[in-house]
Image (cartoon, grey):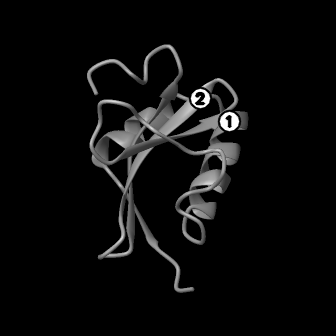
Amino acid sequence: MASFSVIFKPSVEKDLRALPPSVIARVLTRIEALRDEPFPRQSIKLAGAEQLYRLRIGAYRVIYSVDKDARQVVVHHVRHRRDVYRKL
């Protein structure tokens, strides 16, 4: 199976700078794993959103969408769980 490309929205860079350094490595490892499997068992489709999924990494969440035709995973947000669902 061909791998997907991972694209980061511009806001993700700001989100990553706000994270503790120990969490950044874990988050980037899990995001890179989305290249091979964009729908891991831990991902859940968000209710009320058309194509958004969430990936849980401790107290942090990665919100992303998948374009199967273009074979792309677009990462929208990486934030703490108390803040990530606001304004989706």
Indicate whether 10 appears above or below 87. Answer: below
* Direction bottom: furthest residue: 1
Give, as a three-letter code, the residue at label 2.
Tyr
User: Would you call the spot at circle 1 few (<14 residues within 10 Å), some (14-19), or many (20 or more)?
Assistant: some
Quarter containing the N terminus: bottom right
Q: Position of residue 23 (x, y in %)?
A: 68, 35
From the image, tell me which residue sits under label 2. 60
Indicate whether 72 appears above or below 49. Answer: below
Q: Residue at x 52, y 79 (%)?
A: 3
Question: Label 2 near label 1: C-beta < 8 Å?
Answer: yes
Q: Position of residue 54 (x, y in %)?
A: 49, 39
For the residues labelled 1 and 2, the Cα–Cα distance comes to 9 Å
Which image quadrant for residue 19?
A: top right
Q: Residue at x 62, y 35 (%)?
A: 56
* Direction front: furthest residue: 47
87 to the left or right of 13: left
Q: Position of residue 64 (x, y in %)?
A: 41, 47
Q: Residue at x 53, y 22 (%)?
A: 80
Which mark's residue is nearer the viewer, 1 or 2?
Answer: 2
Which image quadrant for residue 31?
A: bottom right
Q: Secondary structure at mark 1?
A: helix
User: Would you call the spot at circle 2 few (<14 residues within 10 Å), some (14-19), or many (20 or more)?
Assistant: some
From the image, tell me which residue sits under label 1. 23
20 to the left or right of 4: right
Q: Secondary structure at mark 2?
A: strand
Indicate whether 24 appears above or below 60. Answer: below
Q: Position of residue 71 (x, y in %)?
A: 38, 75
